[in-house]
Image (cartoon, helix red, strand yellow):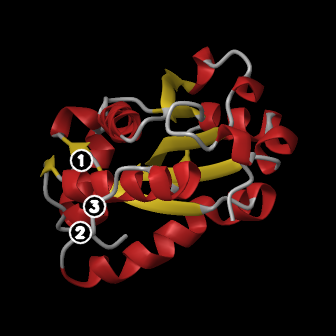
Amino acid sequence: MSTVPQSLRRRDGVRVLVAHAGVHGSTRSIAERIAARLQEQGARVGVLPVEEVGDPGEYDVVVVGSAVHDMAWLPEALSFVRAGADLLAARDVWLFSVGMPAAARGPWRALVGREEGHVVGGLIDELHPRGHRLFSGVIAPEHLTPTGRLKFQAMGLRYGDYRDWPAVDDWARHIGREVLGSGAEADDTPD
């Protein structure tokens, strides 16, 4: 059940913050896509880098995403959620992470499930979010250090754009239906 008060669950009344932390643009692009889908459903949405968020208390719903580096959220994203943990725990919160699960092949694919639990394990306990998704982003050789490129190649990973826009859209629409209620525009695709 949504914690957004019934009086705010109008299509034009719910204020949603989509905050993000990233380095190369994948997380920002996914955050912007989530915001666009929520706006289409009637939410008033602000999409900002975590370091530019003034008062998250101005929003009824918060979606926070971070790039994943070395199996962890970026420090600025962790600082944002930990600094506002009490406030965020009292709101509807969704989390998303942007890593590279789709770049993995062979036996490395089996590690993807473990990565998700490791990345957000403590945040789940702190914030009790309504949901979390691990999306893939874009990975190019220039995004990695020389050592990182060697590790990447040794693991048999592939460079490329792995953003799954239909999955992002479906998840964002799911959030919209949850916070805006049955009046939100919806499609019949599963979450």
Q: Is residue 81 left or right of residue 28?
A: right
Please, what is the three-letter code of the amino acid marked with disc 3? Asp
As shown in the figure, which amino acid type bears the numbered disc 2? Ala
Residue 70 visible in the shown view: no
Task: Give the residue at mark 1.
Answer: 149
Number of the front mark, 2 or 3: 3
Examine the rendering and report whether any part of residue 79 can be seen: yes
| Pick the front one: 113 or 35 | 35
3 sits to left or right of 30: right
User: What secondary structure is found at the residue carrying circle 3?
Assistant: loop
Mark 3 and mark 1: span between their CA atoms? Answer: 41 Å
Mark 1 residue crowding within 10 angstroms, few (<14) / some (14–19) / many (20+) = some
> Could you say where residue 73 lies in the image, as x and y percent from the top left?
56, 47
Q: Mark 2 to mark 1: distance in Å?
A: 14 Å
Question: For residue 187, which numbered disc appears in the image?
Answer: 3
The answer to whether 186 is drawn above or below residue 56 in the figure is below
Q: Earlier in the sequence, mark 2 or mark 3?
A: 2
Q: Amino acid at mark 1?
A: Arg
Residue at image coords 22%, 44%: 139
State the image coordinates of residue 29 (x, y, percent, origin top left).
Answer: 30, 33
Relative depth, front residue between 126 and 16 = 16
- Badge 3 crowding class, 10 Å Cα cut-off, few under 14, some 14 to 19, many 20 or more, is few
Q: Looking at this view, is 128 or 71 the one in front?
A: 128
Q: Which label was assigned to residue 61? A: none
Q: Residue at x 32, y 29 (%)?
A: 24
Q: Residue beneath label 2, please?
A: 104
Question: Tag 1 or tag 2, which sits nearer the N-term?
Answer: 2
Q: Give me the C-alpha separation between circle 2 and circle 3.
A: 31 Å
Q: Secondary structure at mark 2?
A: loop
